[in-house]
Image (spheres, rainbow, N blue to C red):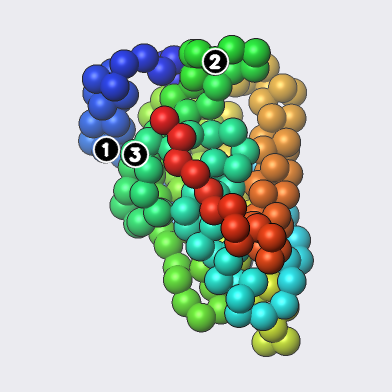
Amino acid sequence: MPASSASPASLHRRLLAARAAAPTYPEVGATREARLPKGYAQLRRRIHLGHGPDVLERAGRYVLGWGCQLGSGFAVHPYAPAEEGATVLLRLSLPGLRRPRLVIPCRVVWTVDEPDRIGFAYGTLPGHPECGEEAFLVTMDTAGEVWFEVTAFARLASWYARLGRPVAVLCQYLAIERYLAAVATAASPAGAATPPQATP
C-alpha cells in the first residue's frame, strides 16, 4: 500500500527505492503505439484545445511540466519537467485531511517534443495501486487544430484497490476528466499566465 507522507528523509528513502525498482508491467512504452496491449483496461480520451502553434506550445509546456497532475491535486517529488527515465513520487492528499498523503511511485518512460507533438508517458512502479502506463500528448494536425489526448492501459495491482474496484475505477475516471480540464484551461490565452506550480 502506498505509504503516507512523512519526513523529507522518509520521502528520500522511498524515492531511492523507486529509482532502483523495475516497472511492474512488461509492455513499457506501449502507449506510443496505436494498439494497446491486451489484458488491461484501456482508455483514450481526446479534447480539442484550439488552433495554431501558440496553443500547442502553451499546452505542451504545461503537460511536460506535470500540469495535468499538479492541476488535479497531486504533488510531484522531486519536481522537474518530465524527462525520460526520471522517477517521481506522486503524492495525493486524502479527502478532508491535510495529511497523510498517499505516495505513488512512477517512472517517465518516454517523452516527445516536436513541432507537432509534445508530451510524455509514465509507468507504474512497485507501490503503485495500478499496473500499467499513462500518456499525455498534445498534437497539432495538418489543419493546425490542436488536440490533447490521454491514453492509458492499466489493471488494479494492490489488494485494497481491487477490494474497492468500483471506487478505484471512478477515481481514475475523475482524474482523467480533471487532467483534460486542466490542460484545456492552460491552453487558453488566459491560462498562459498561470503555469503549473510545484507543491511540497
Amino acid found under the numbered disc labelled 2: Arg
Q: Mark 1 points at which residue?
A: 19
Please name the residue shown 54% across and 65% down the image: 60
Query: Which of marks 1 and 2 precedes in the sequence?
Result: 1
State if disc 1 and disc 3 touch (CB < 8 Å).
Answer: no
Q: In screen coordinates, is 67 left or right of 128?
A: right
Decide which of tag 3 and tag 1 comes sooner along the chain: 1
Instruction: Check disc 3 and report its element: helix, strand or loop.
Output: loop
- Helix, strand, or loop for circle 2? loop
Residue 89 percent location from the top left of the image: 40, 33
**Nearer to the camera, 105 or 8:** 8
Q: How far apart are marks 3 and 2 (CA)?
A: 20 Å
Neighbours of disc 2 within 10 Å: few (<14), some (14-19), many (20+): few
102 left or right, relative to 161? left
Name the residue located 35 percent from the left edge and 57 percent from the top edge.
84
Disc 2 versus disc 1: distance between alpha carbons?
27 Å
> Tag 1's secondary structure?
helix
- Tell me the amino acid under the disc marked 3: Pro
**Towards the viewer: 200 or 1:** 200
User: Residue 96: in sight, yes or no?
Assistant: yes
Label number found at residue 160: none
Residue denoted by label 2 = 98
Q: Which residue is drawn at 41% across and 18% down?
A: 5
Q: Point out the tag, 3 or 2, that comes first from the N-terminus.
A: 3
Q: Position of residue 9 (x, y in %)?
A: 24, 20
Tag 3 residue: 78
Q: Does the CB distance between marks 3 and 2 fall below 8 Å?
A: no
Write the residue at 67% across / 87% down: 142
* Residue 90: percent from left, percent from top: 46, 34
Based on the displayed image, in which of its 4 quarters is residue 113 positioned?
bottom left
